[in-house]
Every structure is written in structure tokens, then in C-alpha cells.
Image: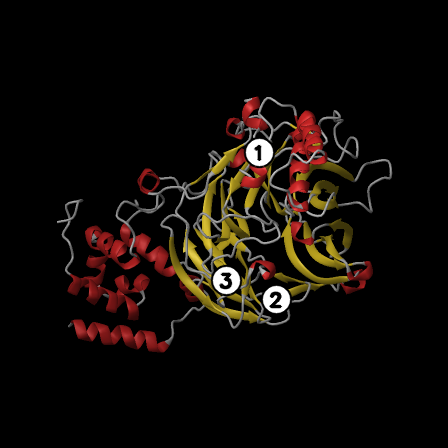
């Protein structure tokens, strides 16, 4: 007997069921076989089968929307978009329509605008505008990014916005305003990232109306920059599509990614650096009670009089000066993000960043208040005091690895992050020499309402390129599933509730992007360096497109019935 009072199935019985399921359509057998219909109603049998077949811990409860274990087995067996139904060969700056068969809707050649290639696209919330991000080749072969906005009504190009570095990508803040980035070098490894709010209709608005406004100005240390911006809507947190933090899993799992809350009211905590510097620099840190200006002057005096031991490298000196400067010229962070009113119009700006090396290893979060969501007002944003030259981050999540992908759940409650881990206890002494990264890709899940990791990291997909060649692998999240590309020539699909890998989708080269249909999660597209976009549908969706079943399947049913009699 199991804990629920039902019989524990012998392995021989389970093995026979597995053989049966491998050859028979689960959804249709009950209609033709009364014996199987009786089996399908046995909840104890299907519960046992479910946990054994998918190798799920029995501490994990059934999906909250499931009516029975039988139907839950059907869902995972029959609704995964794992059947290839189409391969699109000519994707090149193009837009496709989502019909029964995917077809080409529009094609735009961006090379006359000096684009090398396109890399990212995103529809606004009402699907009336399309943001397309690409790599722009400028003078002397210098490359930065550019964002184009295309009207979906007549496919006209409405505006173009510069975007630097190009892997900021850009994103929509609301129906008519988008976010771009710019980068200003301060030193060899120190820079300033400026995030701009842009109106999509720049060529149409009156010259008396602002079409651009500065949102935030953030200092970057140790060759890091802000990249991969996206916006989460806080007002949707209390009505998520799927809650992931069930008590059994939280009790059994431990978070592997420390979370740093920078919204403290304590001046002592704000004065501390975000991460502990290297030992040679640690000795040079000011006492907590010493103002940053005095600390900077003291550092210069110590250098001139030869009191700095051991000798600092140029990189350590630049980082030290930048840390002292930013402490005295940064606007304090917002109050604790966890106190955000879920009914407000507040949104989070989410991006990758870092503090130890150039490879993105942290997730920065900055609150966008309602009055900041329009380009009205001064171009440089609200007036600042002289000691508020930079904006501070409101929250930082340390991943301890190279971040190669991020995606939000449809309800914006959960953030999924692809990363390649650094070795445990590694020490970074040179920001231009990040630690080696693992071939395994970890898929982390963070609850943006609590700012904590809520699932153990998923593993199945792999990547092989080193740090200096590492590239972004886009992932996507639907109501029940999460999908990602990989460098091992496969796309992958996991179930969000059970945390299990359900399908591997074959390509002939790196799969660098995946996307669920926003209205039908049983339709998935995967894009690969093999120059194809593959269209995948669930077995159930494939059957529904064909009125009659293939003849061999009917013969198989007859054979099985004869074997039963």
C-alpha cells in the first residue's frame, strides 16, 4: 500500500503499461477498449505510473489545475509541442503569420541602413508595433546596436533608435514607448550606462513634444555593462497563471544564488560595497565612518607619499577610485521592493550587469515609477542634486556564472535565467580574465514578488563556447512550459510545475532562439544556425488538423483488441 492507501503496482504491471503506452494513443484507447477505460479511472494506478514514469519526487503535489492523475498524464504526454510539422528556410529580416501553416507575411531589408544582422524582435502589448533590434556597423567598422520600430498595419518603418552596446537589445515599456541604451567610457574598465525612454512615433510627433527622455544613469565597474533589458509589470503578481512555490519543494530545496537587497534604510549597509573586493584592495577600503570624498583624498595622498602597500595595478587603482567616486555621487536606492503595492502601476526594469568582470553575472532590478513612463518633461529626466550623478540599483541577484539568457513568465511573476556556472570558490583577480564556465547550462527560476529563487536549477541543455565567444541563447515561457535553445543542436522543453524535461527538439546546428505562440502554448518555434525555423505542435494539435487517423494506427488498435480477446 502507498501513503494514500492505494496498491503499489508491481514492476511487471508497470512495464506492460509502458509497452502499451508506447504503441497506443492514450486519448483514444478508452473509446475502443472497455478494459482500458476501467484502467483509466484507477487513480491509484495513474498516480503510481505518473511518479515512476517521470521520476518525480512524491513530495511534489499534482498540478493545481489537474482534475485527475489520468488527465495529468495525458497533458504531459499529449500537449507538448514536440512534433515537427514545418521547416521555414528563408528567415532573413522577415515577419511570419501564425495560421495553420506558418507563412511569410512581410520582409524588410535593413542593409541599406548599415545593419549587419538582426538579433531580436518584440511586439508591443496590442501587437500593433514591432520592435526589431540589430547590429549597426558605423564608421571605421565600429559596431553598436540600432532599434527599428515597424507598424504592423502597413509594415512601414516608423523610427530608428541607436542602442549601445548592441546586446542591450531594447524592449517595450508600454504600447508606444521603448527603452534603449547608451554607453559612455570613463576609463579603461569603468563606464556609464544610460537608459533612454523613446517614443515609437519619433517621425510623426510635433517638434514641440519630447520624443526621448533619460531614465537612469548607472556606473559600471570592472569592464561590466548593462545588457539585455526587459520590463516586468508588478500589477499582475497577485494573479499568477501558475504558483511555483508549493511548500514541499521549498522545504526540500535550497537557494544556490545569494540575493542582495540594496533597499536598506541603514546608512552603514549602503556604505558597504556590493561585493567583497580582492585582498589587495580590501586593505585600502575606508572605515565606514569616513566620507567618500575624504577617502578619495586619503587614497591620493597615500599614493603620492608611497604609503600604499602592496603596490596597486592600474586596474585596481581605477576600480578603487571609481568605487569611492560612485559612493559620493549616487542617488540612494528606492525603498524595499517587497513593499511594492501590487495594484499600483509600478514596473521593474530588469537587466544583466556585473561588478567583478566583463561577463554578465548579476541581474540588476530598477523600479520604474508611473511618472517616469512617458517622454513628457525634461529630456534629461527629473532634476538631480550634485551628489546624485548616478542612479543606484534597487536590487541585485548574483548568479555566480555567465548569464546567457533570460525570460519572463506570461504573468511577469517569475524570471527564468540561463547561466553557465563558474567554479565554486573561484577568485577573480583580473576583470578581463573571468573564470572558466561550465558546459552545462543551469536554468534558474526567481520569484519577482519575493526576490528569491523558488526552484532548483534545471539541467539538460549544454553549451561549449568559452567566455570571449559566449553568446545569448533566448528562452521563452508559456503558462505551463519553459523552452530554451542550446549549443548541442537541440531545443528543450520543461514543465514549469514538475521541473522536468519533457522533450528534445532536433536541429542540425546551434539552437539560439525559441518562442511559444502567445495564444497557443502547444505551438513552438525554434530558430537555429542551420538556417531553419522549425515549427512544432503537440500530438493533440496534429491530430486535430487531420480529420481521419492514419490507417496503420487503426490496424494497430484492431490487433491489440484481438490480443485482448
Residue farthest along the front direction in this orientation: 306
Q: Which of marks 1 and 3 is nearer the N terminus?
A: 1
Does 351 sit above or below residue 405?
above
Task: State how far apart marks 1 and 3 are (Cα).
Answer: 33 Å
Dot 2 or dot 1: first in sequence order is 2
> How many discs mark residues in the rendered view?
3
The colour scheme used to paint the residues is: secondary structure
Q: Which residue has dot 3 on it?
A: 463
Q: Do the residues labelled 1 and 3 touch (CB within 8 Å)?
A: no
Answer yes or no: is residue 238 visible: yes
Secondary structure state at the residue bearing disc 2: strand
Nearer the camera: disc 2 or disc 1: 1
The residue closer to the viewer here, 250 or 524, is: 250
Q: Is mark 1 on a helix, strand or loop?
A: loop
Q: Residue 103, which numbered label?
A: 2
- Separation (CA) of disc 2 from disc 3: 31 Å
Q: Which of the 4 quarters of the picture holds residue 383? A: top right
User: Which sits in the foreground, 226 or 220?
Assistant: 220
| Residue 311, x across and y down, in percent | 63, 42
Residue 181 image point, x, y percent = 71, 45
Q: Mark 1 points at which residue?
A: 273
Mark nearer the N terminus (2 vs 3): 2
Amino acid at each position: 500500500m502507498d501513503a494514500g492507501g492505494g496498491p503499489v503496482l508491481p514492476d511487471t504491471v508497470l512495464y506492460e503499461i509502458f509497452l502499451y503506452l508506447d504503441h497506443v494513443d492514450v486519448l483514444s484507447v478508452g473509446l475502443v477498449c472497455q478494459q482500458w477505460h476501467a484502467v483509466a479511472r484507477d487513480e491509484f494506478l495513474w498516480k503510481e505510473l505518473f511518479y515512476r514514469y517521470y521520476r518525480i519526487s512524491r513530495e511534489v503535489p499534482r498540478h493545481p489545475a489537474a482534475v485527475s492523475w489520468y488527465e495529468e498524464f495525458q497533458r504531459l504526454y499529449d500537449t507538448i509541442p514536440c512534433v515537427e510539422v514545418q521547416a521555414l528556410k528563408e528567415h532573413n529580416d522577415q515577419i511570419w503569420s501564425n495560421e495553420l501553416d506558418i507563412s511569410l507575411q512581410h520582409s524588410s531589408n535593413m542593409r541599406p541602413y548599415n545593419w549587419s544582422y538582426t538579433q531580436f524582435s518584440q511586439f508591443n502589448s496590442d501587437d500593433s508595433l514591432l520592435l526589431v533590434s540589430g547590429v549597426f556597423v558605423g564608421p571605421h567598422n565600429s559596431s553598436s546596436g540600432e532599434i527599428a520600430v515597424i507598424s504592423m498595419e502597413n509594415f512601414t518603418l516608423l523610427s530608428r533608435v541607436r542602442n549601445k552596446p548592441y546586446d542591450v537589445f531594447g524592449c517595450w515599456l508600454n504600447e508606444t514607448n521603448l527603452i534603449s541604451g547608451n554607453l559612455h567610457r570613463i576609463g579603461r574598465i569603468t563606464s556609464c550606462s544610460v537608459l533612454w525612454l523613446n517614443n515609437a512615433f519619433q517621425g510623426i510627433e510635433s517638434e514641440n513634444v519630447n520624443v526621448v527622455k533619460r531614465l537612469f544613469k548607472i556606473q559600471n565597474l570592472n569592464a561590466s555593462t548593462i545588457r539585455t533589458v526587459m520590463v516586468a509589470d508588478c500589477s499582475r503578481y497577485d494573479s499568477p497563471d501558475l504558483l511555483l512555490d508549493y511548500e514541499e519543494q521549498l522545504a526540500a530545496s535550497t537557494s544556490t544564488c545569494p540575493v542582495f537587497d540594496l533597499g536598506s534604510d541603514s546608512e552603514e549597509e549602503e556604505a558597504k560595497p556590493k561585493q567583497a573586493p580582492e585582498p589587495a584592495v580590501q586593505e585600502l577600503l575606508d572605515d565606514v565612518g569616513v566620507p567618500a570624498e575624504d577617502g578619495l583624498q586619503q587614497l591620493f595622498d597615500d599614493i603620492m607619499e608611497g604609503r600604499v602597500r602592496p603596490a596597486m595595478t592600474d586596474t585596481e587603482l581605477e576600480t578603487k577610485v571609481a568605487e569611492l567616486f560612485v559612493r559620493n555621487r549616487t542617488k540612494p536606492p528606492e525603498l524595499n521592493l517587497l513593499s511594492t503595492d501590487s495594484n499600483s502601476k509600478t514596473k521593474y526594469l530588469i537587466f544583466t550587469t556585473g561588478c567583478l568582470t566583463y561577463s554578465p553575472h548579476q541581474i540588476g532590478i530598477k523600479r520604474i515609477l508611473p511618472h517616469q513612463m512617458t517622454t513628457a518633461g525634461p529630456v534629461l529626466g527629473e532634476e538631480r542634486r550634485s551628489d546624485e550623478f548616478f542612479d543606484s540599483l534597487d536590487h541585485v541577484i548574483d548568479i555566480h556564472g555567465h548569464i546567457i539568457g533570460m525570460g519572463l513568465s506570461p504573468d511577469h511573476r517569475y524570471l527564468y535565467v540561463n547561466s553557465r556556472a563558474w567554479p565554486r570558490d573561484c577568485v577573480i583577480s583580473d576583470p578581463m580574465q573571468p573564470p572558466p564556465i561550465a558546459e552545462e547550462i543551469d536554468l534558474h527560476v526567481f520569484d519577482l514578488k519575493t526576490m528569491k529563487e523558488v526552484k532548483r536549477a534545471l539541467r539538460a541543455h549544454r553549451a561549449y563556447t568559452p567566455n570571449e565567444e559566449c553568446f545569448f541563447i533566448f528562452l521563452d515561457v508559456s503558462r505551463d512550459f519553459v523552452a530554451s535553445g542550446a549549443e548541442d543542436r537541440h531545443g528543450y522543453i520543461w514543465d514549469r510545475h514538475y521541473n522536468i524535461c519533457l522533450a528534445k527538439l532536433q536541429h542540425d546546428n546551434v539552437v539560439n532562439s525559441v518562442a511559444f505562440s502567445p495564444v497557443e502554448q502547444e505551438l513552438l518555434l525554434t530558430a537555429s544556425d542551420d538556417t531553419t525555423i522549425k515549427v512544432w505542435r503537440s500530438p493533440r494539435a496534429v491530430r486535430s488538423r487531420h480529420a481521419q487517423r492514419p490507417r496503420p494506427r487503426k490496424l494497430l488498435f484492431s490487433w491489440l483488441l484481438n490480443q485482448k480477446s
